Amino acid sequence: MEKGTSSPKTRSISYAKWGYIFILPFFIVYAIFTLYPQLLTVYNSFFEYYRDGLTVVGPNFVGLANYKALFTANSAGYVPIFKFLGNTIWLWVIGALPQFTIAMLLALFFTSTRLNIKGQQFFKTVIYMPNLIMASAFAMLFFALFSQVGPVNQLLVSSGITQQPINFLGMRIYVQSLIGLMNFLMWFGNTTILLMAGIQGIDESLFESARLDGSTSTQVFFNITMPLLMPIFIYVFITSMIGGIQMFDVPQVLTNGHGIPDNTSTTLIMYLNNFLGISKNYGMAGAVSMLLFVITAVLSTFVFKTINKK
Amino acid sequence: MAEVILKNIKKVYPNSEPKEKKGLFGKKKKDDEEKPHHTHHLQITDEGVVAVQEFSLNIKDKEFIVLVGPSGCGKSTTLRMVAGLEEISGGELYIDGVLMNSVEPKDRDIAMVFQSYALYPHMTVYDNMAYSLKIKNVPKAEIDKKVREAAEILDITQYLNRKPKALSGGQRQRVAIGRAIVRNPKVLLMDEPLSNLDAKLRNQMRAEIIKLRQRINTTFIYVTHDQTEAMTLGDRIVVMKDGFIMQIGTPQEVFDHPANLFVAGFIGTPQMNFFDAKLAIHNGDYYVETEDVSVKLSDSKQKRLKEKGVKEQPVTLGVRPEHMEIAETGIPGKIDVTELMGSSSHLHMTIKGKDAIVIVPRSDSQENHMGEEIHLSFDGSNAHVFSLEDQHNLEY
């Protein structure tokens, strides 16, 4: 063997650090603007910390007192958090049910190779449009449309359908229906497009095979389409539910933040927002936020486990 | 268990563009011709792209018909029209004497095996096979019996509780076949069922389809682009090109008497060799002549050509690789590559500037080496003569 020769040293180059460097800006922004406020929210929920006139009270550590206060009945004799949770779920359901139903029908309609609908791109754009409008602007539009002197009432009175203008924004059934309708209009296009993508992802030969196996269109839907669309549907359902629990801008703007009539359209986030108004009660707001987090996590897990059982 | 009749079947995919392209001021452009024209070999007319036309075929009860041809020839489209998955643009389709043109696929009593298997991924093998029976409300005990019988035939009993994703390609194909036969359909359609399998498994499954055919009494329509599958499986094969039927016949007929140059080149591996030649008549007998050889055609060929009154003319001469042999004199050519195939060798040659293949016994190949010039001869009974004008076989 020649003197001085040795086996060459192997050098490995790690590219991993570049990956970390590239994603670092996101983590910095996330840490400053999301993680820190979240941790602060958790922290605040255990403190008495609010403004009373010009005086700032706290922060004083109170343990679980804020949480306990959330579950205490108010002077009107009900526990606000339960009522507003009920409102939130109900307002989401009346918007989401038609949203899923219509979106599914439209998705089936547009993806049907037998119908072969023309101008699909146009319809997809049109039904997605409402989603591009800011929720608050949409709510302002409805507020103007359905106010006592709005065009809807003018039309109803002038056409003789009603003698007096209807107080749409003062009656529970109308306010809740309008909120449901707005949520439906804003989101059905988005859901349609997601479901269409899901259906188009299913191998066409499965539908053909099912038809040859003797399935009717209904049987194809329930036995083939729906089970194979379930992952997309779960995604749509859970994201809609999370969005529903966080419902704020539409009822806030439509009811001017009062949840009229009689708090029947006050949602959990509106309730939370009330703590951040004049009183700046970060302690109670933190406790409501934590509760919302728990509710969202529990419901999402429950839905995922239930639908995805098979 | 049914007779299938296709009468002058036609499939046209309508144009998405307007029928008439108009120029400025609504005047028709000059380059818009009334005559149909061809793009990518398929005919395009005012109606649209013609995928299949003039397709007429009588499929007998329990017959195994194979539709074979290159990609885009219309074989799968024809099969899908039989299944009801494609609308029939023209002509008539009868199954057991009943006109089926507007009958829904579910009401045709047809089963189909897809190239992609089309197994329901969320169902077990058992449920996949039982699905068609379940939706027809067949009693559970009967479903169970039929599924297990089919599984036994296809040797997939041990996989009944598995989901398709837990099976290999070959096993999935068996399940797809099982799902089709469990219904005992009138007609069993197979759309390139072996295309996704590797060569070894394909050979094995081909043999199993032959065995299966003996066990189940039904009419088969099988689509493939693989001429070996067509030759080994079919009672009759239908060779297609550009939407037209090129030839219908038993595998032997199609191999021995190709109707035209396309069929001659498509059927048979390796492909038939073609040479420029002349059909000559000497003393009332037909000869095929190249620059180097003159070969008298066999008696049967003489008879057929005489009956048709074929005149002297330049032709394309076709001779299969296995029908050519090395000789002292004959057509000269240079060996480019020698492939040892076991008992024989394939000599890849250049003859008159064209590629050709000759199959020779192994001993011959050992004497001949790459780059060597040799001469080839052939027997008059194995020469096929094709018209230069329309490429049809002059004997038929």
Image (cartoon, grey):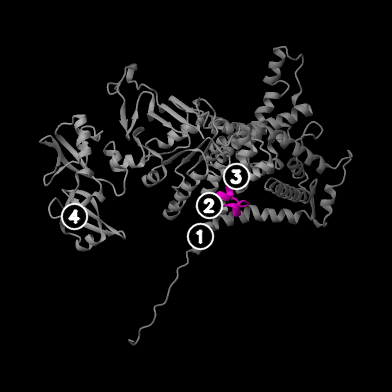
Residue occupied by mark 3: B128
Q: Nearer the viewer, residue B360 or B348?
A: B360
Q: Amino acid at mark 4?
A: Ile
Q: CA distance from mark 3 to mark 1?
A: 45 Å
The answer to whether one can see residue B1 in this image is yes
- Residue A144, image quadrant: top right
Disc 1 secondary structure class? helix
Q: Residue at x 58, y 57 (%)?
A: A28
Nearer the viewer's eye, disc 3 or disc 4?
Answer: 4
Task: Indicate the chain on which mark 3 is placed.
Answer: B
B44 in relation to B145, above or below: above
Counting residues from the N terminus, which is met first, the one under dot 3 or under dot 4? 3
- Are labels 2 and 4 on one chain? yes
Tell me the crowding category of disc 4: few under 14, some 14 to 19, or many 20 or more residues within 10 angstroms, Cα based: some
Q: CA distance from mark 2 to mark 3?
A: 13 Å
Nearer the viewer's eye, disc 3 or disc 1?
Answer: 3
Q: Amino acid at mark 3?
A: Asn
